[in-house]
Image (cartoon, rainbow, N blue to C red):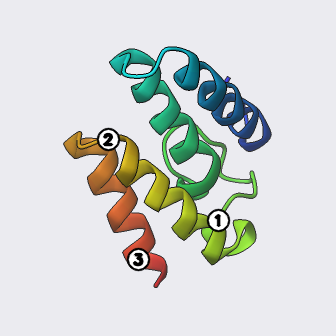
Amino acid sequence: MRVQSRESARAAARFAEQVSKLWYGDQWFVREHVWAIHAAYIRSSGQEGEDEGEPGSIDQVGYNTTVKAAERILELTQETLPVRRTVFAVAKEA
């Protein structure tokens, strides 16, 4: 779901939040939740998995929303790749 569109990614993030509460600590669910948040709120247009013409830059989502999503990702995981991509995306827009 998270690679279809930004709206699908937001639905996936909401669903993953519910599932991760039921199976707290299951690393697979946490990982999917992190990537769903990244796809919905962090990843900007033109990055992998999105069409160039599809809207989705951080400006359109809202910088404050993006920062909250980034904080949530940093709370959920210590994995290098999602943390690095999140921090760089937010820093680029700051």
Callout 3 secondary element: helix
Callout 2 secondary element: loop
The answer to whether 23 is drawn above or below residue 33 in the figure is above
Q: Would you call the spot at circle 2 few (<14 residues within 10 Å), some (14-19), or many (20 or more)?
A: some
Task: Give the numbered dot on residue 57.
Answer: 1
Contact? badges 2 and 1 (CB < 8 Å): no
Label 3 to label 2: alpha-carbon separation: 21 Å
Query: Which residue is found at the position 62% from the left and 76% from the top?
Result: 63
Closer to viewer: mark 2 or mark 1? 2
Residue 42 x/y as whole percent: 54, 56
Q: Is residue 77 left or right of residue 52?
A: left
Residue 7 x/y as whole percent: 79, 40
- The amino acid on which the numbered mark 3 sits, given as a three-letter code, is Lys
Q: Is residue 57 left or right of residue 73?
A: right
Q: Would you call the spot at circle 3 few (<14 residues within 10 Å), some (14-19), or many (20 or more)?
A: few
Residue 43 x/y as whole percent: 53, 53
- The amino acid on which the numbered mark 1 sits, given as a three-letter code, is Ser
Q: Earlier in the sequence, mark 3 or mark 1?
A: 1
The answer to whether 58 is drawn above or below residue 9 in the figure is below
Task: Give the numbered dot on residue 92.
Answer: 3
Q: Which quadrant of the rendered structure holds the N terminus?
A: top right
- The amino acid on which the numbered mark 2 sits, given as a three-letter code, is Thr
The answer to whether 20 is drawn above or below residue 50 in the figure is above
Contact? badges 3 and 2 (CB < 8 Å): no
Residue 31 x/y as whole percent: 40, 27
Residue under label 2, please give it: 77
Query: Which residue is found at the position 48% from the left and 53% from the top?
Result: 72
The answer to whether 33 is drawn above or below residue 38 in the figure is above
